[in-house]
Amino acid sequence: MSHRFGILRRFRFNLPQRIAAGLLALFLLQGFWLTSRQTLTDQDYQYARCGRETWEKPSPLAGYYTSCGNIRDGILAYRLAGLPLTLNLLVERTLDFFRKPEDRVFQESGSSLSTWELRHQMTHVLFLLRAPFLFAGCVLGGCIWWVSRRLYGNLGGYTALALYCFSPAILKGCVSPNPEVLAALGIYGGVYTCIGVAHAMHGPRRKWRPRIILLTLIFGVAATAHIVALPLAAILGLAGMLWVAEGHRSQTLPVVLAASGGALLLLFASYGFSPDAFSYVFRSGAAFLWVSAGSASRFFGALGSGGITVAACASALFYLAVRKSRYFGNSVPLICSLVLLFLVMTEAPGSSWIWSIPFLLTFIGGVFADACEGPRGRLAIYAAGAIVAAQAVLCVLSLPSLV
């Protein structure tokens, strides 16, 4: 029987999807708890002011895109931070038609409100600033679960997603305006979409175009989140494509270049098609990188990441000791996490070690799934459950320090 919503027939919300939704709900609850105990900071004002300027009006400073200058550390974070405030102002401006003159937010002058005035006129400013980043964190968590479950089954997906939802580093990145989670989403999604395109190359050409369009959009997220994220996603994704696309390797580079070109066009559009602001991204040295182990040592040495540290060490030992675990599905996230974990930004703000966490958790989920299928599978399941429980406890205990 035909149904008007027939395109949704393949969607299922069964037990695996419900468990994943429950974990993401816990992630959101932690984010809301942290947000409810925060106060507005100088960084919040900067993102709110300059984010609103990208939507509402040009910079009052001649020659600059915003009063923050020509943004080089990821314009997407500024636009996402400013969008809820701009939309809220539009709603308030509309509601002013139904208010008494003395109660109107916009008085006779009709000028836009400053960031300081917004603080007193609008409610839930903290939530409005952080909602887009919490949403991006949920989307990234959903991507990790989808990829891990598709590669390793339910157990691998649950393990990776649970560790993600109780990661203090990810939570901290989602409760303040910054480009880290957005860049992580762009790189993680870009790499695995590249692999998806490579798999599609073995099928009919009619299936290529939707995946290439999706790849262009995800590369666009990476480029607008942080200029370093686009070349990293393109290089890692191209390497994965060359690994998979046997017999079609000559077509992988044109696909990646076309998607990267489309991403740069989206980046140009995000700067309002301003040539000067767009060109400053490439003139500012924002893409300069170096190598350091400092960020990795701080991440693995933090008490709040104790469960992830134990899981990563156990997974690495199992990967080296058991030959059957050294296959494409486990090797790709391991290589990507190692590449990103030791990179540092030398010119523009950025934390590439946060970008490595989704790949690391995917690797952990894959190795634990392999261990659970071995001769001591029940012991591996108990170990995975204990590590996830320990990480959840450590994360909850560390939440006050993240405020």
Image (spheres, rainbow, N blue to C red):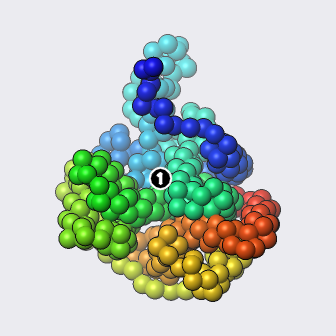
Quadrant hosting residue 375: bottom right
43 on left or right of 75:
right
Residue 61 sits above or below residue 120 on the image: below
Residue 111 sits above or below residue 269 on the image: above
Question: Mark 1 packing: few (<14 Cα in 10 Å), some, or many (20+)?
Answer: many
Q: Secondary structure at mark 1?
A: helix
Can residue 315 be seen from the camera position used here? yes
User: In the rendering, at what x and y percent does residue 290 appear?
Assistant: 42, 84
User: In the rendering, at what x and y percent does residue 31 appear?
Assistant: 66, 50
Q: Residue at x 57, y 62 (%)?
A: 152
Can residue 140 be seen from the camera position used here? no
Indicate the quadrant containing the N terminus: top left, top right, bottom left or bottom right.
top left
Q: Residue at x 59, y 58 (%)?
A: 153
The outermost residue toward the front is 375
The residue wearing badge 1 is 47
User: In the rendering, at what x and y percent does residue 353 appear?
Assistant: 53, 73
Q: Residue at x 48, y 37 (%)?
A: 10
* Viewer-closest of 101 and 292: 292
Indicate the quadrant containing the C terminus: top left, top right, bottom left or bottom right.
bottom right
381 on left or right of 326:
right
378 on left or right of 315:
right
* Viewer-closest of 298 and 285: 298
User: In the rendering, at what x and y percent does residue 3 appear?
Assistant: 44, 21
